[in-house]
Every structure is written in structure tokens, then in C-alpha cells.
Amino acid sequence: MALQFSRIASHRPNGKEDWRLACGPWTVGRVQEEIKPVGTVFGWSLTGPSVPPDLMSNRGEADTLEEAKAQMVAAMKRWSIWAGVRQANGDGPVEPRWVLAKEHEPGRSTAITSEPETYWLMLSSAFVAGRIYRPANWQGARLHWQLLTSGPMAMPDQVAGWADNTDAAKMELLAAWRRWLEWADLAAADP
């Protein structure tokens, strides 16, 4: 995981600090200098990864730019381990596993499909990275697969499609996940 800060050329008043944190081409966060009644602080936020609010914060403040950058890098590393795209020892991603949605989220509405036995989740550690399902009210036999890296996590490549059976859908989704890891510069172990 190659995290890199770059200063944003902005039109902020008084030349206030404004920094972007990227992992490859993926913008994962930002640090901005803020003036508050107590003085100057540096606010940071992870804006790229989908963060589980019950496990970690995606924002914070620090007294110095260096502290804010360090806090944001630490948060991104925590997220990457939680999401299975990085291991605690610096090794690369864990291999995703497949779970039926009804087993992963018992009691949760499956309004997305009328066939719970065809609704699969691809989990990368605790992160639901993708899903396979036959849409409700869908008349065809094909299954829809979808990588769940939308919004700021989106890569400029195919992230969804159709397959004739579960095995083919799993292969397509896993291939899309691996392309996303490559695009986000997360596929290799730390040097």
C-alpha cells in the first residue's frame, strides 16, 4: 500500500494548508487547516474508503499538520486491515470468501432478490466487497454480479455485469476485485 500526500493547489484564503492522501490513483482522504475559536487545528477525514462507524472514525483533528497526517495514515491502515486489503504484518490482501447473504445478515430484508439461495456476498475480511444475486422481479435466468466499490472507491473499469451461473459470476466478481486492488495500489505486500 503506497500512501502518498500531495498538497492541493487551492484558492483557500490566507494560504491555508490543504493536503490530499492517495493510494495509487485512489484519493482516500484529505487534511485541511481550519481556524476555530480555540485556534488553528488540522482536520482530517478519510473520504475514499467505506468506513464502519461502529469500529473506527473516519475523521479527526490535530494541533499540527504532521499529527493530522499521521492520524489519517493510521486510520487508513486500520481500515485496510479491517477490509482485508492489507494484513497486520504488511502482507497483501487476504483471499475473499463467499457467504450466502441470509447467513451473513440473518433477518435482514432480502428485497433485492426473491431467491435467497442465489444471493451471495464476497467478503474481504469484514468488508462486503461484492455481491451476486438474481434481481427481484427479474424474468431471466442470469445472475447479476456487482463490486461494491462505488463513489470515491470507484475505479474506471467494469464493476458489474451478468453471468449465466453462480460459478461464472463468482469468477467475474473476483476478477473485478483483483483489478480494483491493482488499480488502488493494494495488490502487493508492503516493501
Image (cartoon, grey):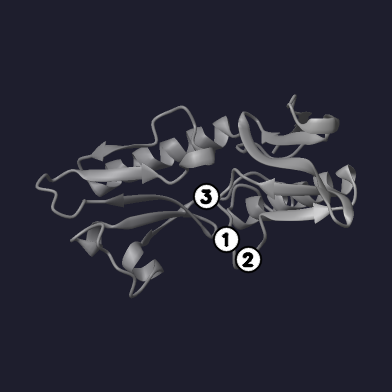
Q: CA distance from mark 1 to mark 2?
A: 6 Å
Q: Residue furthest left?
A: 139
Up the image or down, 145 lies above or below 125; here it is above
Q: CA distance from mark 2 to mark 3?
A: 22 Å
Residues 179 and 18: in front is: 18
Residue 29 location (% of width, % of height)? 68, 42
Quadrant for residue 14, please give it: top right
Residue 81 image point, x, y percent: 65, 54
Residue at (59% x, 63% y) in the render: 53
Kindly indicate whether the residue at mark 2 contacts the one at mark 1 (C-beta within 8 angstroms): yes
Q: Label 2, on which residue?
A: 55
Residue 124 percent location from the top left of the image: 51, 53
- Callout 3 environment at 10 Å: few (<14), some (14 to 19), or many (20+)? few
Counting from the top left corner in percent of width and height, residue 106 is at 35, 73
Q: Amino acid at mark 1?
A: Pro
To which quarter of the image does residue 28 belong?
A: top right
Q: Element type at marker 1?
A: loop
Which residue in the protein does label 3 denote? 95
User: Is residue 88 visible to the viewer in this orientation of the structure?
Assistant: no
Q: Earlier in the sequence, mark 2 or mark 3?
A: 2
Which residue is under mark 1? 52
Measured in 3D between alpha carbons, the distance from the residue under mark 3 to the one under mark 1, in whole angstroms, is 20 Å
Mark 1 surroundings: few (<14), some (14-19) or many (≥20) residues within 10 A: some
Q: Secondary structure at mark 2?
A: loop
- Judged by depth in the image, the label closer to the viewer, 3 or 1, is 1
Residue 34 vertical placement versus 59 (above, below)? above
Seen at 72% across and 37% down, the residue is 21
Name the side, left or right, on which 141 lies relative to 157: left
Instruction: From the image, state whether disc 2 or disc 3 is nearer to you.
Output: 2
Specify the farthest residue to the top: 9
Whichever of callouts 3 and 1 sits on the residue coming sooner in the sequence is 1
Q: Amino acid at mark 3?
A: Glu
